């Protein structure tokens, strides 16, 4: 008998009837993209939901990264982390800058602020950390270093939708933060993304840049790109906002269940909630210590797959091992021991709002019964 497939995530789909109402309106109004009313409404609604002053919507989560660097005129070298999705480093490359990898803090998977200063050279212009799995970076320490050396900070917050520290959004840290609203994310618009900024002037510039650089009918103020979210996706996002809290709570319950079941399994570790942090439970990574567990990470990963449980090894392989980047001096494994260790031991277990008790028992059973 083929066992039910359980994927690492499952998209949160809005209520179809609700969405249809918006679609009928869009169809009759015939305004389907280019800063339409639902685009504007979603920006306002997200500012309120996320507790951020300004946001600019994009067609995906990669173009905001590229545009953020473009908007801040970043050149030279950008300090970043190898433990992320490859889009983070690609954005630096697309801007003609050189990525410089620093190692991660094994306690969180995020960039280790204590390693940043040693990587700064006269060519360094920015730091691009990632709130991996939605776990907040040590933003105060990073900002102190940035201020000391006059560097910009752009956070890849693709995983950090709705994450707060002491009641404040993590998305207002640094100069700019980017979000991904891809189908696999906590909040999705099928494909989509956003840039979060702190002032109206920056929003204006970024809105120009995502519209080819147009500042009016005949004026182009910069080398912009086309990355405007259309009305259908904006409407989808508005419907999604109505169900997002329940979905995050369902994810929270999944995390509780995993932690209860796996806490005492020798050789398996995971992250606990951080004090003062409102988490979004976007991923549930576990780390396999083969010696203590008695099976390697890949043996467990493959066994799960044999049972049609499709976890993922986010983020293996490390970005620094891909051929585009592996020749960089900072990409040497000796420079990145913690990142290598994490990439080689991680499995992201299925984590989404639709997992049932039965699904979770199946997954946990395979991990526990070696
Ligand atoms: N920065 C960071 C830190 C990121 O993690 C990402 C993206 C970005 C930037 C860039 O943002 P975007 O430009 O993508 O907006 C996925 C996503 O495509 C990607 O968005 C995400 N990070 C990355 C971590 O994961 P894949 O290639 O692993 O996804 P895929 O297609 O294998 O899907 C995973 C599972 O999700 C499937 O096995 C089943 C489920 N799924 C997926 C899709 C697309 C569904 O059930 N329905 C679906 O429609 O990259």
Image (cartoon, helix red, strand yellow):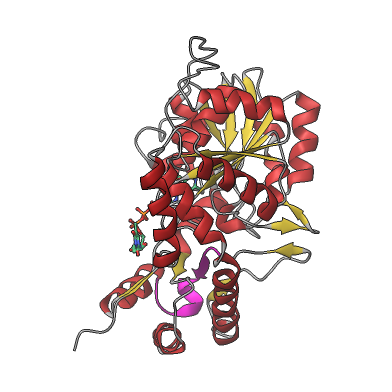
What range is drawn magenta here? 282-296
User: Is there any visible trace of residue 123 in the rendered image?
Assistant: yes
Ligand 1 lies in quarter: bottom left
Query: Viewed as shown, does residue 266 lie left or right of 25?
Result: right
User: Residue at point 57% right, 30% down?
Assistant: 68
The residue nearer to you, when weighing 31 against 179, is 31
**Picture coordinates of residue 265, whole percent (x, y):** 54, 84
Query: Viewed as shown, does residue 265 lie left or right of 305?
Result: right
**Picture coordinates of residue 161, whole percent (x, y):** 60, 55
**Picture coordinates of residue 311, whole percent (x, y):** 38, 69
Residue 291 lies in the magenta stretch = yes
Q: In this view, does 363 lie above or below 206?
A: below
Picture quarter with the N terminus:
bottom left
The image quadrant of residue 146 is top right
Q: Which residue lies furthest to the top in this view?
A: 218
User: Residue at point 62% right, 18% down?
Assistant: 123
The residue nearer to you, when weighing 244 against 273, is 244
Query: Viewed as shown, does residue 292 lie left or right of 54?
Result: left
Q: Is residue 265 above or below residue 201?
A: below
Q: In this view, does 136 lie above or below 279?
A: above
The image quadrant of residue 321 is top left
Picture quarter with the C terminus:
bottom left
Q: In this view, does 297 lie above or below 231?
A: below
User: Residue at point 60% right, 44% down?
Assistant: 43
């Amino acid at each position: 008998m083929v066992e039910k497939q359980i994927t690492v995530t499952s998209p949160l789909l809005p209520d179809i009837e609700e969405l249809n109402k918006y679609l009928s309106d869009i169809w009759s109004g015939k305004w389907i993209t280019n800063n339409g009313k639902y685009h504007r409404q979603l920006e306002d609604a997200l500012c309120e939901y996320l507790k951020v002053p300004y946001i600019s919507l994009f067609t995906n989560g990669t173009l905001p990264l590229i545009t953020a660097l473009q908007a801040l005129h970043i050149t030279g070298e950008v300090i970043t982390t190898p433990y992320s999705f490859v889009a983070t480093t690609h954005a630096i490359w697309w801007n003609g800058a050189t990525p410089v990898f620093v190692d991660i803090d094994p306690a969180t998977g995020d960039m280790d602020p204590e390693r940043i200063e040693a990587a700064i050279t006269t060519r360094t212009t920015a730091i691009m950390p990632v709130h991996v799995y939605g776990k907040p970076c040590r933003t105060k320490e990073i900002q102190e270093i940035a201020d000391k050396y006059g560097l910009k900070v752009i956070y890849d917050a693709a995983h950090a939708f709705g994450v707060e520290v002491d009641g404040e959004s993590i998305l207002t840290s640094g100069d700019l933060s980017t979000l991904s609203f891809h189908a696999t994310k906590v909040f999705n618009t099928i494909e989509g993304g956003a840039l979060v900024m702190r002032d109206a002037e920056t929003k204006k510039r970024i809105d120009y840049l995502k519209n080819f650089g147009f500042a009016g009918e005949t004026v182009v103020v910069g080398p912009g790109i086309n990355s405007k979210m259309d009305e259908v996706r904006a409407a989808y996002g508005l419907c999604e906002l109505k169900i997002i809290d329940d979905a995050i709570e369902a994810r929270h319950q999944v995390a509780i269940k995993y932690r209860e079941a796996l806490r005492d399994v020798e050789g398996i570790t995971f992250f606990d909630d951080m004090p003062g942090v409102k988490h979004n439970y976007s991923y549930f990574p576990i780390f396999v210590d083969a010696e203590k567990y008695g099976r390697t990470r890949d043996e467990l990963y493959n066994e799960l797959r044999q049972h049609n449980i499709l976890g993922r090894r986010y983020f293996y392989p490390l970005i620094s091992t891909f051929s585009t980047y592996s020749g960089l001096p900072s990409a040497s494994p000796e420079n990145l021991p913690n990142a290598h260790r994490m990439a080689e031991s991680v499995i992201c277990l299925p984590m989404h709002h639709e997992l049932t008790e039965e699904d979770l028992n199946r997954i946990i059973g395979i991990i526990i019964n070696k």
